[in-house]
Every structure is written in structure tokens, then in C-alpha cells.
Image (spheres, rainbow, N blue to C red):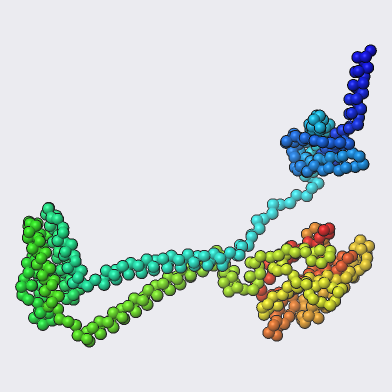
């Protein structure tokens, strides 16, 4: 009996504890019958007086449904209960009947499961007999984007100039190196080279041949540079004959023995080089010594130049320096000109003549169409549009009208203006009869034309049509051409348009005027109109 009472008491405590903190877990969907690809909202709710710890699965699985979006857990305290809500957006692209599977949730250490829910997914019926069919649309030609023409052109020029300057610097360094070598006087260079030749080791006939070739080259180059005779291209006999003639003419006091020594070395060198004559190291060294004596004696035999000769030589060298400098400048400028013309021709062939020309000369409206535009909202109800710059609020004393402006700072007219005015008609659009709508449209058109006339426009030829803007809102478009004076007082034929929104809250007008001959005016107009969107709700 005592045992039964104990069990009864224990069960009562357990039941009372569960009843004190009762936990309810439920799940639901917004619709049990949807179309293929239609979004389903699935919700899990947990209700309890006390919740210490809730553990959801690390990764939810609703197969065969896919999770489009998983929202954060929402906690709400209502009266004495806590309400936890977890929302999901699910989707399925197959038709048939499917079950949203159960989900396991651990609350305060206890496991709970949501209910599985059946969802019927129907196919979308397409009636090809009733639905009108259309031909495939033709390919639309897209205009080339000319925004980067100037950047490409200048990068091309920059790289070309960089390579041209690199080549000129390289040539300058090479010439400077050559000039440094030239600063060594011919006599000193000949003596230096002969001393280097003295250190050469000779063993084979081929080495003797190279030795004598170098020996005769040293003395010939010296005579050509110092004595001013064509020694390098002359035969041995011709060279000796030229030296004899200089001696006889008194231009050089050269001893006969010096000429004989040179003759001896040249003849032996010819035999070694061309007749394979054999010789030895001692004779070769003696011939080198003879050539050194010839160089020294020739230096002594050359008369000192007169002042007139020195002056003529300096003037000649100065003229040569100027000539070389002008030639280098001409080559550099010519290369730059060729490079610029090539880049210009390439840009024109890719982008066209007018876009390149207008980009280079910074044509005002070309700068506008190629620049970064701004998307902003104005007035109330908000009208969103894209413009080259943010429209500036007009500081007008008229509080009834809100006017936003953008105007070009060049000679030809270019105006963008947005105006918010009080409503014209107090009746709603669906309350107006057809006659009243037509009459209201005529009044608006006349009011727009009168506005242009007040601004000084003449010869106005207006047209009108109803257009559909973003969001499916209709607007009245009045457009055409007119004459307007520019900053110089000249009459310019211009194009214009005004787009009017007739609303219960306000009357909105967007107008633009630009030169009829402006190549980019129509593109700017099209871009502004395509960006128009009346925001219904913020």
C-alpha cells in the first residue's frame, strides 16, 4: 500500500512539473497548393512559459524542397508566454504531391518534432492556341562605348613616348661612351695599343697573322687620324706614296728612315698575312718597336696648326654638333608625330571620327554622355531620374513650385529642369470622363507651350504622345523644335521635350532643351527618359 502511494505521489509531481511549463511546437505553411516554382513560406513556432535553451539543427533539410531564404529567429513575449518564430522560404520546381519533412528541435534537453505538411504542386498550363506568338526579334545594334577613347589614346601615346625616350637615352649613352673613347688623342691611343700588343704571346702562324694585322691597323689608323690620309683603305704602296707626297710638299718633315722602317713593316706584314711567310718572336717584337718609332717620328714631323686652322676646325666641329643635335630633335619629333598619327588613325578606325574628335577637343555634351551620371530622387511624390549632375534646387520665393535645374555653361542652349507644382485637377483620373481628359490634356499642352514662349522661344512646333515610364505609370510627353537665343544673342534651332505627370498630389514637369545639331543630345534625352521612375511608396 505504501509503495502504491509513493508511485502515485511521484507521478503527480512529474505531471505537475510538466503542466507548469508546457511547451507547444507547431509548424505551418502559407498555402498547401501552389504552382511550379512558386515560393512557399514555412513557419516553425515554439510557445512556452519558460525556455532556457533551444537547439535547432545545424543545417535544415526540407528535401525535396529547396531553401530560398532562412530568416533569423524572432522572439516575442506575450502575456506570460514566450513565442519563438523561425521562418523559411521554400521552392520546388517539380509537379506532384510532396511532404515538407519533420524537423527535430531540442528544448531544455527534450526532443520535439514538427508536423510533416503535404503540398500539392501543379504545372503551369500554357495554351499555345490562345496565346499570341511573335517572330524572333532582330539583332539590335549596340553603340560602341566611347568612354575610354581618350584614356586609350593617351596610354598609347605615353607608351610610344616612353619607348622613344628609352631608345634616345640608349643612343645617347652609346655616343657618350664613344666620345669618351674619342677624347683619347690618336697618338696616345696608338702608343697604348702598341704596349698591349707587346704582351701578346705568339706560338703558331695564325697568331702571327693576327699580330701583324693588328700592328698594321694601329699604324694605319694613327696616320689616318693624325696625318689625315686615307690609310685604312689604301694598299701599302699607296700609303707610302701619299706620305712621300706630303714630305715633298713640305706639309710634313718626315725622315727617309722613318718611311723605310714603315715600308719594311708593311711588306713583312703582307707576306705574313697573304703569302704565309714564317717569322719568329724576336722579329715580331722588333717590328713592333719600328712601328712605335714611326708613330713617334710622325708625331714630331707634323707641323703645329695655325690659329686660322684651329678656328676653322672649331667652327666646323660646332656646326657638326648643331647639325647632329637638330637631326636628333627632328628624329624624336618625327617619331612622336608618326606615333600620334598612328594612334589617332587607330582610334578613329575603332570608335569613329566624331567620337574621337569630340573626346579630344572636350565637346561639352560628349563630356556629359561619357561622364559618371547621378541617380537621385526629387520632390514629393519622389521622382527618381538619372542626370549628369545632381539637379540644384532653385532659390525661388514661390513656395508653391519646387524647381530643380541643370544648365550647361557653354554658348549653345542646354537646359534640364524639373518642376513640382500644385495639382491641376482635383478629380481622380478614374473620375474624369473622356471629354474631360481630352480637355485637360489640351490645357496642359497649351500651358507647356506658353511656358516656352515666356522663356523667349519662337517658331515652336510641338507634338505630343502618351508614354509609359518605369512602374507602369503613364505620362504626357510634349516634344518638338523651337528657336532660342544663345549667350551671344544668336537664334539657335533647338529640340525640346516636356514630360508631365498629372497626379492628385501634384503636377510634375521634366523638360529638356538642347541644340538640334548636337550629336549627343538625343542620347542624353533617351537616357534621362529611360531612367524616369515615379516612386509610389518610400
Residue, x 76% and y 38% (percent of image)?
92
- Left or right of 531 in this view: 442: right
Residue, x 13% and y 55% (percent of image)?
202
Image location of residue 170, percent across then percent down: 37, 66
- Left or right of 30 in this view: 414: left
Image location of residue 162, percent across then percent down: 45, 66
Residue, x 70% and y 69% (percent of image)?
389
Image location of residue 126, percent across then percent down: 78, 43
Mark count = 0
- Residue 355, compared with residue 209, is above or below; it is below
Quadrant of the frame with the C terminus: bottom right
- Left or right of 327 in this view: 142: right
Is residue 440 at least partly visible in the picture?
Answer: no
Residue, x 83% and y 68% (percent of image)?
508
Is residue 241 at least partly visible in the picture?
Answer: yes
Quadrant of the frame with the N terminus: top right
Amino acid at each position: 500500500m505504501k509503495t502504491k502511494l509513493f508511485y502515485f505521489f511521484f507521478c503527480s509531481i512529474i505531471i505537475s512539473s510538466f503542466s507548469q511549463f508546457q511547451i507547444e511546437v507547431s509548424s505551418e505553411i502559407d498555402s498547401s497548393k501552389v504552382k511550379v516554382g512558386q515560393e512557399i513560406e514555412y513557419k516553425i513556432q515554439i510557445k512556452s512559459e519558460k525556455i532556457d535553451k533551444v537547439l535547432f539543427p545545424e543545417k535544415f533539410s526540407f528535401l525535396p524542397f529547396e531553401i530560398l531564404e532562412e530568416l533569423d529567429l524572432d522572439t516575442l513575449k506575450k502575456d506570460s508566454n514566450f513565442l519563438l518564430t523561425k521562418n523559411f522560404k521554400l521552392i520546388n520546381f517539380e509537379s506532384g504531391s510532396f511532404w515538407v519533412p519533420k524537423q527535430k528541435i531540442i528544448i531544455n534537453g527534450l526532443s520535439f518534432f514538427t508536423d510533416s505538411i503535404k503540398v500539392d504542386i501543379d504545372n503551369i498550363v500554357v495554351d499555345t492556341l490562345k496565346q499570341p506568338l511573335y517572330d524572333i526579334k532582330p539583332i539590335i545594334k549596340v553603340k560602341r562605348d566611347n568612354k575610354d577613347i581618350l584614356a586609350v589614346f593617351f596610354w598609347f601615346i605615353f607608351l610610344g613616348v616612353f619607348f622613344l625616350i628609352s631608345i634616345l637615352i640608349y643612343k645617347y649613352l652609346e655616343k657618350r661612351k664613344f666620345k669618351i673613347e674619342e677624347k683619347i688623342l690618336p697618338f696616345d691611343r696608338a702608343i697604348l695599343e702598341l704596349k698591349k700588343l707587346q704582351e701578346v704571346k705568339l706560338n703558331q702562324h695564325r697568331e702571327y697573322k693576327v699580330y701583324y694585322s693588328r700592328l698594321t691597323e694601329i699604324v694605319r689608323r694613327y696616320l689616318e687620324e693624325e696625318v689625315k690620309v686615307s690609310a685604312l683603305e689604301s694598299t701599302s704602296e699607296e700609303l707610302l706614296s701619299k706620305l712621300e707626297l706630303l714630305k715633298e710638299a713640305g706639309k710634313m718633315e718626315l725622315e727617309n728612315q722613318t718611311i723605310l722602317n714603315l715600308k719594311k713593316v708593311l711588306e713583312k706584314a703582307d707576306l705574313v698575312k697573304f703569302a704565309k711567310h714564317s717569322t719568329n718572336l724576336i722579329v715580331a717584337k722588333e717590328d713592333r718597336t719600328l712601328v712605335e718609332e714611326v708613330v713617334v717620328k710622325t708625331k714630331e714631323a707634323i707641323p703645329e696648326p695655325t690659329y686660322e686652322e684651329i678656328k676653322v676646325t672649331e667652327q666646323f666641329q660646332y656646326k657638326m654638333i648643331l647639325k647632329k643635335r637638330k637631326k636628333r630633335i627632328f628624329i624624336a619629333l618625327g617619331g612622336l608625330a608618326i606615333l600620334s598619327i598612328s594612334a589617332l588613325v587607330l582610334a578613329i578606325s575603332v570608335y569613329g571620327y566624331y567620337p574621337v574628335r569630340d573626346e579630344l577637343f572636350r565637346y561639352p555634351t560628349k563630356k556629359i554622355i561619357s561622364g559618371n551620371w547621378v541617380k537621385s530622387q526629387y520632390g514629393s511624390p519622389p521622382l527618381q531620374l538619372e542626370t549628369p549632375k545632381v539637379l540644384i534646387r532653385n532659390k525661388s520665393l514661390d513656395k508653391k513650385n519646387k524647381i530643380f535645374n541643370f544648365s550647361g555653361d557653354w554658348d549653345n542652349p542646354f537646359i534640364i529642369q524639373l518642376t513640382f507644382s500644385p495639382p491641376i485637377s482635383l478629380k481622380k483620373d478614374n473620375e474624369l470622363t473622356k471629354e474631360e481628359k481630352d480637355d485637360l490634356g489640351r490645357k496642359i499642352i497649351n500651358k507647356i507651350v506658353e511656358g516656352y514662349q515666356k522663356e523667349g522661344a519662337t517658331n515652336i512646333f510641338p507634338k505630343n504622345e502618351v508614354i509609359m515610364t518605369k512602374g507602369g505609370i503613364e505620362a504626357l510627353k510634349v516634344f518638338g523644335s523651337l528657336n532660342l537665343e544663345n549667350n551671344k544673342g544668336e537664334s539657335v534651332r533647338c529640340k525640346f521635350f516636356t514630360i508631365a505627370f498629372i497626379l492628385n498630389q501634384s503636377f510634375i514637369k521634366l523638360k529638356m532643351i538642347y541644340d538640334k545639331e548636337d550629336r549627343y543630345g538625343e542620347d542624353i534625352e533617351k537616357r534621362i527618359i529611360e531612367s524616369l521612375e515615379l516612386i509610389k511608396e518610400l
